[in-house]
Amino acid sequence: MTRFIIALLSLWALPLYADISVDKAWIRAAPPNAPAMAAFMTLQNNGEQDVKLLSAHVAGFGRVELHRTMDVDGMMKMVKQDFMPVPANGALELKPGSWHIMLIQPEKVPQVNEKIELTLTFDDDSSTKVSVTVKEAPIPQHMQP
Ligand SMILES: [Cu+2]
């Protein structure tokens, strides 16, 4: 009986959910009539298993998509992605010109220093809330690679 209980306890000790932490999150400030805004952050996977970010949700926007800016036949284009891969014991960096979360159809474009709460949902059914602040981009968008 004791052995059975110990076995159960050790099962509980297994990590049930991904160990994801979010760092350096920001949303690029946009003009009041902007149709969309981009959110950037570093997704750090402290676990032993690869994890996929499947979706992001936020109040005040029509919809949210996972995007990656890629070279498509010599043109840099944003391509919608089904998921974002976060490698075990590694990180995925969302940054201008690369992976980003696209916040589309704002009811009202949030201004610099406003905070927006994003909920990120991963493929192990775990989700995490991130508070993201609107900031001026360090480099103007048209000068980005
Ligand atoms: Cu985009």
Image (spheres, helix red, strand yellow):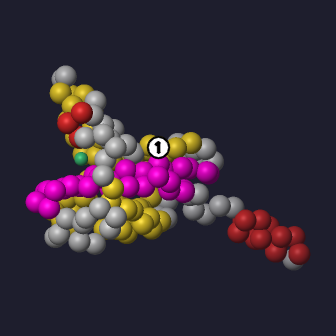
- Residue 112 in the image: state x and y as whole percent: 29, 62
* Residue 114 spot, x, y in % from top left: 32, 68
Chief secondary structure of the magenta span?
Answer: strand
- Is residue 66 among what the camera can see? no
Q: Depth check: give the residue in front, 25 or 16.
A: 25
Q: For the image shown, how many numbered marks are present on the structure?
A: 1
Residue occupied by mark 1: 92
- Judged from the image, the secondary structure of the residue bearing numbered disc 1 is strand
Residue 81: x percent and y percent?
29, 45
> For disc 1, does the CB lie below 8 Å from ligand 1?
no
The one of 24 and 53 positioned closer to us in this rendering: 24
The C terminus appears in which quarter of the rendering?
top left
Identify the magenta region.
Answer: 20-47
Give the farthest residue toward the left.
Answer: 33
Along the line of sight, the residue nearer the viewer: 44 or 4: 44
The structure residue drawn at horizontal position 28% and vertical position 72%, both measured from the top left corner, is 59
Residue 71 occupies which quadrant of the picture? top left
Residue that protrudes farthest toward the right in the picture: 2
Residue drawn 36% across the image and 68% down it: 115
User: What amino acid type is highlighted by mark number 1?
Assistant: Leu
Q: 36 or 7, which is in the foreground? A: 36
| Residue 62 found in image quarter | bottom left
Q: Position of residue 60 (x, y in %)?
A: 23, 71
Above or below: residue 6 compared with residue 137:
below
Write the residue at 21% across / 31% down.
Answer: 76
Horizontal placement of 142 versus 126: left or right? Answer: left
Would you say residue 75 sits in the magenta stretch? Answer: no
Quadrant where the N terminus is found in the figure? bottom right
